[in-house]
Amino acid sequence: MTEDEKRSAGRLFDPADPELKEIKRKAHHLSMDFNRLYEEETEQRAAILSELLGALGEGSFLQGPITFHYGIHTKIGRGCFFNFNLTVQDDADVTIGDRCLFGPNVTIVTPAHPMLPEERARLRTADGREGRFCYAKPVHIGPDCWLGASVTVCPGVTIGAGCVIGAGSVVTRDIPAGSFAAGVPCRVVRTLTERDSMRWSPEVLGDAVIPE
């Protein structure tokens, strides 16, 4: 297997592999190019994102600055909004559903390393080559989720549709759909219900109208 095939299969792989390093180099440069642009330079921004990402749905907006590790392993749905300082370490696939909202400083991480220090420092391939290897687990975020400021999503996590993740949370395990979850580590606080509607907070709703 190539190192990229090992990466895709969730096996230990060498991140210093030349093919993988070239993909990362390109993603890092494109991220920097995006971050140099003004918001009104929409055509240039769109061109960069089309080259950087695996998919980007119509109407999705990345405020910037952004940092993607591979970029091509990330697929974003339609109508999403990502605030300042989005970081996606997408060694494995990252899938984000439609209409998601991300607060500032959200980080998604897919790679992991051996727990024992001697194995982190050095492992050997079947042909005798030594290196520092890692492995990666995909992250899936369902549609209509809101991730508050400074949320970190860890490798292998699935967040179900319609969830709210409280600011500063570290999501280490799956969160079922329709949940409000928060904390370090992140845990489900309760299921979201009709009682969470803004109609029960008229002082905040003001003159806004909730569509029927």
Image: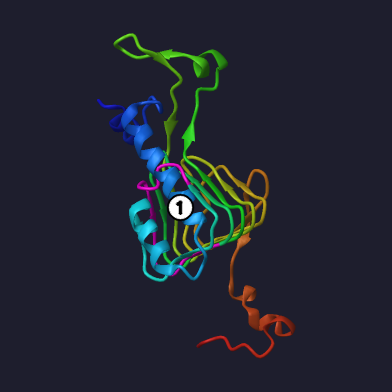
The reply to whether the magenta stretch includes residue 70 is: yes
The amino acid marked with disc number 1 is Asp
| Res 179 quadrant in image | bottom right
- Image coordinates of residue 151 in percent, x first then y, are 61, 51
Asked if residue 92 shows in the view, the reply is no
Q: Nearer the viewer, residue 118 or 25?
A: 25
Q: Eyeballing the image, is 14 above or below 191? A: above
- Colour scheme employed for the rendering of this structure: rainbow
Q: Secondary structure at mark 1?
A: helix
Q: Residue at x 56, y 42 (%)?
A: 172
- Image coordinates of residue 146 in percent, x first then y, are 56, 63
- Image coordinates of residue 104 in percent, x first then y, are 61, 57
Residue range corresponding to the magenta coloring: 68-82
- Image coordinates of residue 139 in percent, x first then y, are 44, 46
Q: Eyeballing the image, is 44 above or below 203? A: above
In the visual, does 178 lie left or right of 137?
A: right
Circle 1 residue = 33
Q: Residue at x 59, y 75 (%)?
A: 194
Q: Principal SS element in the magenta part?
A: loop
The number of numbered discs placed on residues in the rendered structure image is 1
